[in-house]
Amino acid sequence: MNMLTDAAIENALDKTPAREAVKMRGSDVRVFYGEKQALFDVNLDIGENQVTALIGPSGCGKSTFLRCLNRMNDTIDICRVTGDITLDGEDIYNPRIDVVELRARVGMVFQKPNPFPKSIYENVAYGPRIHGLASAKNDMDAIVETSLQKAGLFNEVKDRLHEPGTGLSGGQQQRLCIARAIAVSPEVILMDEPCSALDPIATAKVEELIDELRENYTIVIVTHSMQQAARVSQRTAMFHLGNLVEVGPTDKMFTNPEDKRTQDYITGRFG
Amino acid sequence: MGEHTVTSFDEDLAQIDRLIRDMGDLAGVMTQDATRALLKSDNALAQRVISDDTIMDAKQRDLDEKAITLIGKRQPMAQDLRAVVGGIRMASDLERIGDLAKNIAKRVGAVGESATPRSLTHSIDAMAQMVLVQVKSVVERYVEREADALTKLRDEDEKIDVHYTSVFRELLTYMMEDPRNITACTHLLFCAKNLERIGDHVTNIAENAYYVLTGEQLPVQRPKLDETQMMTSAG
Amino acid sequence: MSENTLTTPKPFDWSSPEAAAMRKRRYAADRRLRLYGLASIVTAIGLLGILITSLIITGHTAFVQTHVAVEFTADPENVPADDPASGNFRAVVATAVQKLFPEADSPAELRVASGILSNGTPNIVRDYVTANPGLVGQTFTLKVPASDPYDQLNKGVIDRDLPEDRRRVSDTEIALFETLEARGLVTTPFNWGLFVNSDSRFPELAGLAGAIAGSFYALLVCFVISFPLGIAAAIYLEEFAPRNRWTDLVEVNINNLAAVPSIVFGLLGLAVFIQIFGLPRSAPLVGGLVLSLMTLPTMIIVTRAALKSIPPSIREAALGIGASKHEVILHHVLPLAIPGILTGTIIGLAQALGETAPLLLIGMNAFLTSPPGGIMDPATALPTQIFIWADSPERGFVSRTSAAILVLLGFLIFMNAFAIFLRQRFERRW
């Protein structure tokens, strides 16, 4: 009898798990808004060059966690964060860490496309300019062009770089925001429901873009669309009532989740 | 498991489950009727099995359609997705069981004409009883959501295989004893093989059902003891 | 499911008369509400119309001025050629009046006749000759304003048909004036004097130039102080200040300050700027300081509202790519808020332009016959000028008061229109 070993079968199916390095790590993260605790002891690793999706019902803390990763929560007075969040092993809440540098390294794309009311060129060039990434005009032009190209927008807007960014369609605006985020060469890109205001075609374009960006960037995406999380991410983390309920490979999360709450949520049985 | 927020989703899933149960019941009846017709050379019963198979096919097509509509409409996830995809696969196994039962029924006339001694069919009868139990209980276990029972049920198939080996040997012996038995025994041999195939489909169904219920695949290796090949090549 | 069966509504007949009546009532309520609004607007416009109409009716006469064309001879006897300004123009005018009415011989008659011309006529002739020294020894015709009673007579404010004892001009005076009219010497051109003259005791000579200049200087000071202070304070409060008891207190007090009666600011200005700092009384500088105290709270509130109205998504976008706080504010928030801030500023300044009480207290209601040369010179302002004129007994000031109010309203309308223009010009979508 031709008995195969388990390993040989795994090999034949190409299931050998890729060992990704951890880019960001949250340990025992707790977030308080005044008296109210919004996150309870969240421990979550964000793998490098991976798309990590954060899912969960509204108000579950997934956006809160996302906004901890580049300290966007700092802008809210009553928000308090405890626990450790590290980027490449460095605590980002350490007082010595420069928040401006952190946000350049950990960029963000928001739910509603929010281009500046300036030209398309200026939208992309703004970040590199304030960080001093390009001094000569040629360098800046190159940064703008590559960023727009990476965001898959260049061909659509190359003839009207100096027209206002707010004149683009919703999907183009969102890709412009992504171009703006990658113009400062971040290592991690956080996306807070980037497609919730877009139609399916624009959504597909953004998803395709996310898939391409994975090669060079670490991406964390919050989404309300289960299908989207399943499509774009490699790892999925499920939040519920401020707790990290379950985290695992996306393929497993959407076929055979372990936690009852995850099951109920992704199959539409909540409430 | 709680109810879906969208109640019609539950109804759609329940419909698929109901069709699986119907097909399972029908497969059980067809297997039973086919073996009974074979053993009693009951041509009328055999004809009923053959016509039942049309119903079986129709039900399978209905289930396929419903499952695909459900996937398109509701994008099921996790256990719902497993239930729908598993349902499609179980239905195709059940439909195959129906085909095999029809094959057995088709041989009823041939075996009957060649005046088979009753004694030849004893061991097939026993095998048929075992297969019947398997067919009937597999869908029952699935409907009752008893994953562990399904594992046991799969292991039971081993016994059918063993029994098939012995039926094979027995019929071989009859044919060597008396060449006049060869025609009948060959037909019976095909019937035994069909019964064994039904057992294999039951195994597939059990595996699928287990996956639907638990999300885990049963281990690939299963003791497969069909010694008939070795015997024929040896002797 | 069970509660569903309990609450299944019984079928409703939409076409029943009850339903139709109900709908009719609802439509009627809609119409009534619209009517109330319309009525309010009509009332408001009506009241405004009455105000403006009454102002125009009394004030329109002040925009023209009765002039009499008089032939003057700059006799070298009276006007020395080397220094025309030092000449005896009273005599020149007297001679001219004599020539104007050759038939008048008694001194009493001549006195009456010379009363037709404005009291300031010698000064007008002197200024004219001084500007054109070549006229010494020549005879020239000059249109000079008629004095107030004849001005009113000419404009028909004084009714010639009234019995003599009930009007301000006697039959003799009317007769004299009518001879001038008959000779075609009386004209009523547009009254430029209203804008180029300063205040005067004689209505026919009084103008708003000094008041407009004073208001301009005061507003300039007010703008220079309150605009940067207001914006900076608002930015701090809105963007940097932590939300705690202290900032709440500051916020409440800013709102309170905006509601303080303006006369209190006047008292404050008097006590602090004039008595403690020793700044000159009646100066536009002090006026501007007081007005800026008044405008500052409004400015802070308006700027904060403008900053607040900038969608947080813009701030987030800038913060998200690593902009620091000052970059977010200076590059993104402030440029977007500027139209709102400018609108608020102009409306605040317009309010300051119309403010009277505090200026009265710091002495900006002085009688000044020349416009201020700078922010330290004594000056009046438009509203205080109106106040002064309204207080004057001469008949001519009645129409001038209304005219001055119309001028003030004109400035306010212009400023508000400018605010709207700015808002539409700079408003950007995001």
Image: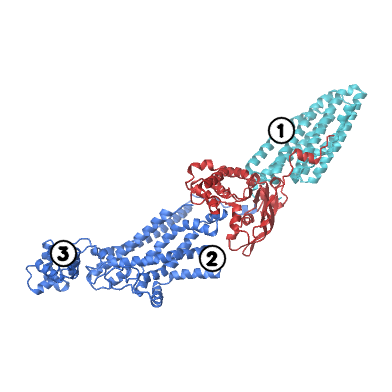
Q: Quick check: can you spot residue A88?
A: yes
Q: Which mark is residue B57?
A: 1
The three-letter code of the residue at mark 1 reads Asp
Q: Mark 2 vs mark 1: tell me if same chain.
A: no
Q: Nearer the viewer, residue A254 or C381?
A: C381
Q: Is residue C212 left or right of residue C128?
A: right
> Going 47% across and 52% down the picture, which residue do you hit?
C429
User: Residue furthest toward the top?
Assistant: B180
Nearer-N-terminus badge (2/3):
3
The chain shown in cyan is which?
A: B
Q: Secondary structure at mark 2?
A: loop
The three-letter code of the residue at mark 2 reads Ala
The three-letter code of the residue at mark 3 reads Val
Whether label 1 touches label 3, CB < 8 Å:
no
User: Residue furthest toward the front?
Assistant: C82
Q: How many marks?
A: 3
Q: Residue tagged by mark 3?
A: C68
Q: Chain for mark 2?
A: C
Q: Mark 1 vs mark 3: tell me if same chain.
A: no
Q: Quick check: can you spot residue C42?
A: no
> Going 41% across and 56% down the picture, which residue do you hit?
C423
Q: Secondary structure at mark 1?
A: helix
Crowding at mark 1 (Cα within 10 Å: few <14, some 14-19, many 20+):
some
Give the colour chain A carries in the figure. Answer: red
User: Residue furthest toward the right?
Assistant: B177
> Mark 2 or mark 1, which is nearer to you?
2
